[in-house]
Image (cartoon, rainbow, N blue to C red):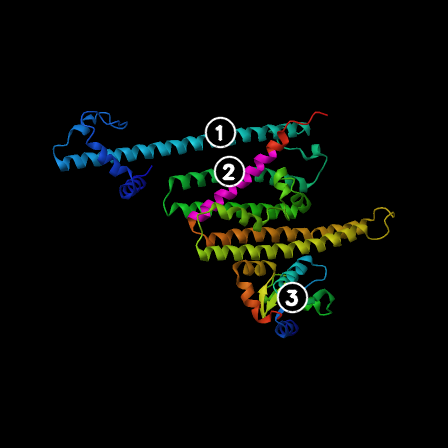
């Protein structure tokens, strides 16, 4: 990777515990044998040169350096292998998801790959083209999300510079804000669709709260995955979680009230009089109130992410965002595996 | 507008709302949870409601109820209240008006 990391590694090893001292102690025993060295096989005379002190020390240092290089190379190789295996696993899952989507689309008699014809779904009007657009854009959003999560993982592993990491973090945050913008447009098009969570996978729907994730829940999920927080940070995160929960509770109670109003609106008048259009129109107007709630909930999600990024260092933010991306990935994978599990014989 | 200003100054925490607005209800619940009883004025039940709404718009509240005042100052609507609360600033603002 980069040489500065390497020299740091070597320096810390020199100041470190056992190995260098051990090696020096062993040197006297190995006069003739060539040192097991994978990087420079020609360096076989090391063990024999005890004639000049400074010479020996130089050679010993060289060997230590080489040992350290080997260890580092081996470590990086292990990490690369791990990353590769993880990539394979997620590709496998992605394949499974795609296959399921394909099946679903075929079942509904939709053309796969071509444009969706609204009349085939039995609906008409611009609302559904708006929703179709949203579904497509959301699909792209998820792909980009996964790509950014991988990028965060690599960045944290390879310890990229102090300037690059905050830029990466900001990019990830902006990506979330993009989603909230997408959702705002979709909410104006069809808020019931948005709130039903149809556009999300089944496991994600389990944890749905007013059109998306519950911010305080996420804070609790993520905090253990970040580097230890300072005392001040711990207090700030605790306060943020508490404020978030209070805001969520207030919005939830508002939703309960709206729920009651809607029930009353639908049930208004004498049930049995049939469907009265003016009453329906009035109810539809009331449904529009849901738009404000979804927007407010998204605003809460956005503010929570922003506040966290203010409390945390870029390193911690990156770790948190990586954990968040992984968490959603797992939920989506869970949904796929759940759909794909063999059905019980009847 | 005088009426709006006067009401805002008469009480610590004032919420101008509409009776049918559930988001306004949510905001008043939030204040209550924090230990403040807000003074809620429903402008749709006020004969001068329309002028009050216009006055609020002129003051910077973009036609969305609720309009929240703390200590006579316009704080804003739900967005502003939520942002302040997450930053930890809302508690500071309402401290003087908290019910003992």
Nearer mark to the viewer, of 3 and 1:
1
Which of discs 2 and 1 lies nearer the camera? The answer is 1
What kind of element bears circle 2? helix
Residue A68, position as x, y percentages in the image = 29, 35
Q: Which residues are magenta?
A: A315-335
* Residue named by callout 1: A88
Chain where mark 3 sits: B
Residue lying at the far left in this picture: please name it: A51
The CA span between labels 2 and 1 is 14 Å
Give the CA distance from mark 3 to mark 1. Answer: 55 Å
The secondary structure type at the circle numbered 3 is: strand
- Residue drawn at (55%, 67%) of the image: B93
Q: Secondary structure at mark 1?
A: helix
The reply to whether the C-beta atoms of the residues labelled 2 and 1 are less than 8 Å apart is: no
Q: Does the image show residue B65?
A: no
Q: Are marks 3 and 1 on the same chain?
A: no
Q: Residues within 10 Å of mark 2 (few under 14, many from 20)?
A: some
Residue A50's image quarter?
top left
């Amino acid at each position: 990777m980069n040489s500065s990391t390497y020299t740091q590694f070597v320096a810390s090893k020199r100041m470190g515990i056992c190995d260098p001292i051990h090696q020096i102690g062993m040197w006297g025993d190995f006069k003739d044998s060539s040192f097991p060295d994978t990087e420079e096989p020609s360096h076989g005379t090391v063990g024999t040169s005890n004639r000049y002190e400074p010479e020996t020390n130089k050679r010993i240092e060289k060997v230590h350096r080489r040992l350290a290089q080997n260890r580092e190379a081996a470590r990086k190789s292990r990490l690369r292998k791990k990353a590769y295996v993880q990539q394979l696993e997620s590709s496998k899952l992605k394949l499974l998801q795609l296959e399921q989507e394909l099946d679903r689309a075929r079942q509904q008699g939709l053309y796969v790959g071509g444009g969706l014809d609204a009349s085939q779904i039995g609906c008409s009007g611009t609302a559904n083209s708006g929703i179709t657009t949203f579904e497509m854009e959301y699909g792209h959003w998820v792909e980009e999300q996964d790509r950014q999560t991988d990028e965060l993982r690599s960045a944290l592993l390879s310890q990229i510079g102090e300037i690059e990491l905050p830029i990466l973090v900001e990019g990830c945050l902006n990506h979330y804000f993009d989603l909230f913008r997408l959702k705002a447009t979709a909410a104006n098009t069809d808020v019931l669709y948005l709130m039903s969570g149809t556009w999300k996978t089944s496991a994600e729907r389990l944890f749905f709260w007013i059109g998306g994730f519950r911010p305080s829940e996420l804070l609790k999920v993520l905090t253990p995955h970040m580097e230890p927080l300072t005392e001040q940070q711990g207090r700030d995160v605790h306060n943020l979680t508490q404020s978030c929960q209070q805001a969520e509770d207030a919005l939830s109670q508002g939703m309960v009230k709206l729920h009651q109003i809607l029930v009353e609106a639908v049930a208004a008048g004498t049930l049995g009089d049939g469907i009265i259009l003016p009453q329906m129109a009035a109810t539809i107007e009331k449904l529009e109130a849901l738009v404000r709630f979804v927007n407010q909930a998204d605003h809460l999600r956005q503010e929570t992410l922003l506040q966290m990024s203010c409390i945390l260092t870029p390193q911690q933010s990156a770790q948190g965002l990586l954990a968040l991306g992984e968490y959603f990935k797992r939920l989506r994978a869970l949904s796929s595996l759940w759909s794909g599990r063999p059905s019980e014989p009847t | 507008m005088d009426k709006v200003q006067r009401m805002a100054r008469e009480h610590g925490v004032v919420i101008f709302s509409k009776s049918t607005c559930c988001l306004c209800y949510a905001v008043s619940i939030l204040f209550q949870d924090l230990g403040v009883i807000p003074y809620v004025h429903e402008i749709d039940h006020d004969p001068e409601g329309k002028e009050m709404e216009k006055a609020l718009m002129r003051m910077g509240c973009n036609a969305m109820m609720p309009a929240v005042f703390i200590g006579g100052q316009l704080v804003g609507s739900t967005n502003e209240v939520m942002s302040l609360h997450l930053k930890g600033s809302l508690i500071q603002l309402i401290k003087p008006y908290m019910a003992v």
